[in-house]
Image (cartoon, helix red, strand yellow):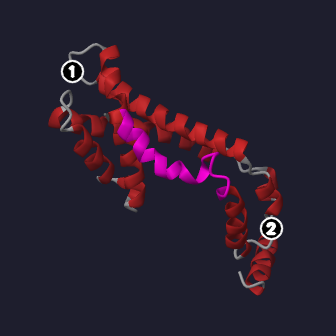
Amino acid sequence: MWPRRTVGLSAPSRWCCWPECRRCLPLFRPLVSRLVRRRVAQDVSPVLDGIHWKLLATGWGLFTLGWWLVASSFWAASVALPGDVRPAYARLADLPRLLVAASLAVVLGFVSLLPGGVGVRELVIYGILAPAPHFGPLRALALAVVVRLIWLAAELLLAVPLYLLPCHPAASNVSQDELATHDRKHEESGG
């Protein structure tokens, strides 16, 4: 039942990029051109010409793989928690439910506009996992907190070293006068 719901939840978001929908890509280019023209003085048509079905299919494939990796990390955390006596391979049946819990928690946490979706992500995870037979309220809450801490640690382990990297030399060669001139030109062009 959960795999069908998972696919059902993702189907509306993929409708616009599905290969059988030939009319979407021609609508995409003029729409983006019009939206970008208001903000950027450059012509974006060369960039948009590079967008084709193969690129969209690759993007959707990588996007789907990314969500499954998030669900896999969620599953690994659930296997590490005590309280479930099933072997790890039997817990694979929980993967679709964990995928839905993780993806909805991240998306609704983002939409909530709270910093880091604090509280919202945990509430969504708890709401989806607490009624499940092998989780229960206590284990669902523990998993929500543990996953929050693991994901926060992973983000910090990646963000801190990247923050400490020196800026690209080309970016540091731009003077304040050049930035002010660019801003003036942008304002004069109606941006």
Which residue is the site of mark 1?
84
Q: What amino acid is at disc 2?
A: Ser
Say few, some or many: other residues with alpha carbon within 10 Å of mark 2 (under 14 / 14 to 19 / 20 or more).
few
Q: Tell me whether circle 2 and circle 1 mark residues in contact (CB < 8 Å).
A: no
State the residue at coordinates (42%, 51%). Answer: 107
Please tell me whether residue 69 is drawn above or below residue 16 in the rendered image: above
Stretch in magenta: 3-24
**Quadrant where the N terminus lies?**
top left
Q: Is residue 146 magenta?
A: no
Q: What amino acid is at disc 1?
A: Asp
Examine the image and state in which quarter residue 126 appears. Answer: top left
Give the image location of residue 134, x and y in percent: 20, 27
Q: Which badge, 2 or 1, comes first in the chain's sequence?
A: 1
Q: Kindly state the secondary structure of the residue where label 2 is placed.
A: loop
What distance separates the C-alpha of mark 2 from that of mark 1? 60 Å
State the residue at coordinates (66%, 46%). Answer: 56
**Quadrant where the C terminus lies?**
bottom right
State the residue at coordinates (41%, 59%). Answer: 111
Q: Nearer the viewer, residue 7 or 39?
A: 7
Examine the image and state in which quarter residue 45 appears. Answer: bottom right
Please tell me whether residue 34 is drawn above or below residue 108 in the rendered image: below
Give the image location of residue 35, x and y in percent: 67, 71
Q: Kindly state the secondary structure of the residue where label 1 is placed.
A: loop
Label number found at residue 175: 2
